Every structure is written in C-alpha cells, then in structure tokens.
Image (spheres, rainbow, N blue to C red):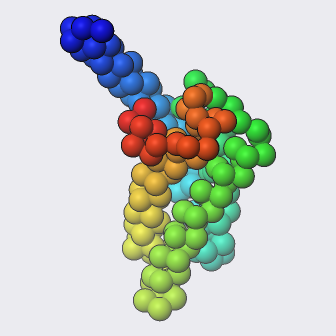
Amino acid sequence: MTAISRLSSLREHVRSSWRILLKEITAFGVIGLVALVIDLGLFAWLSPQGALKAKAVSTIVATTFAYFGNRHLSFSHRARSSLGRETSFFFGINLITLVFSELLIALFVYPLRYEHGSLTVFVVNVVTIGIGTVFRFWAYKRFVFQHPDRVHSRNVDLDVELAE
C-alpha cells in the first residue's frame, strides 16, 4: 500500500467518522432538548410536593422518552444487543445521574435550606442535567448502543471506541 493510498484511506475514515459523530451528537441533542423540557416541566410542576420526589418522577419520564428517541434516532445505525442488556445499561446509567442529581438537590434543599421551588434549586437541577448529559452521551456510546464490530467482542479499546 503506498503512502498516497494510506493517506486517502485515512482521510475517508476521518470524513465518515465525523459525519457519523455529527449525526449522533445532533440527534442526541434534539432528543435531549425534548427530554429536558419534559424533565424541567415536570420538576417545576411537581416540586411543591417535594424536590426529591419531583426529580425522581421527572427523570423517570424523561429517561423513558430518551431511551426510545436515542434507540430509534440518535444511535439507530449502531448494532442492537439484547433488549434486556440494552435497557438495563441505559436505565442504570440514568440511575447514576439521578442519584447524583438527587444528592446535589438534597444538599441545597435540606442543609442549605433553600425552598424546593426556589430559583437556586431549579438552577442546581439544570446544572446536574448538563453534567449528566455529557456523562450519558459517552456512556451510551460506550456501553449501551455499541459499535457493530464491538457487540460480541469483550476486548474493546476505549480510545478506538471514543474515536468512532
């Protein structure tokens, strides 16, 4: 293989990888915005019943919407593994982000004594969603919606997976 053909092959790989990544990020963002509206709307509506209860309910509803949106839009080109594996990883990842959100909201509502309907608690909720979004995008690509070549492989190179 000549240097020119290797360069051409590398350029084509980078070009196709970027198109796929752009599609995933764009679709993930659209699904995420709708899930954000669901999450924040339910949180605001239910927060008089208690901030932690409101966060749990709003996250469960938004996560359920996000699963179907991400499976059928954001990561539709990726291989399917078993439904049980995929959903347990997806909801497990979201459980981790829910626990993180609940802990931070509880910190502001209880020891710091902010009212459950205050702007500060709402902002903390938005910040935890933002941090969780970055974690979820990485985790969905890595663990839930796997690359077709990686579905049955146990030896996954993290650098290669993140590059795709």
Measured as percent of width and height from the top left, residue 82 is found at 76, 38
Measured as percent of width and height from the top left, residue 99 is found at 58, 70
Q: Quadrant of the C terminus?
A: top left
Quarter of the view holding residue 97 = bottom right
Q: Quadrant of the N terminus?
A: top left
Q: Is residue 119 left or right of residue 109?
A: left
Q: Which residue sits at x=47%, y=83%?
A: 107
Measured as percent of width and height from the top left, residue 10 is found at 30, 18
* Residue 75 in sight in this render: no
Measured as percent of width and height from the top left, residue 33 is found at 48, 42
Quarter of the view holding residue 163 = top left
Q: Is residue 77 left or right of residue 133?
A: right
User: Looking at the image, is 30 positioned above or below residue 52?
Assistant: above
Q: Which residue sits at x=56%, y=43%?
A: 155
Q: Is residue 102 left or right of residue 20?
A: right
Quarter of the view holding residue 47 = bottom right
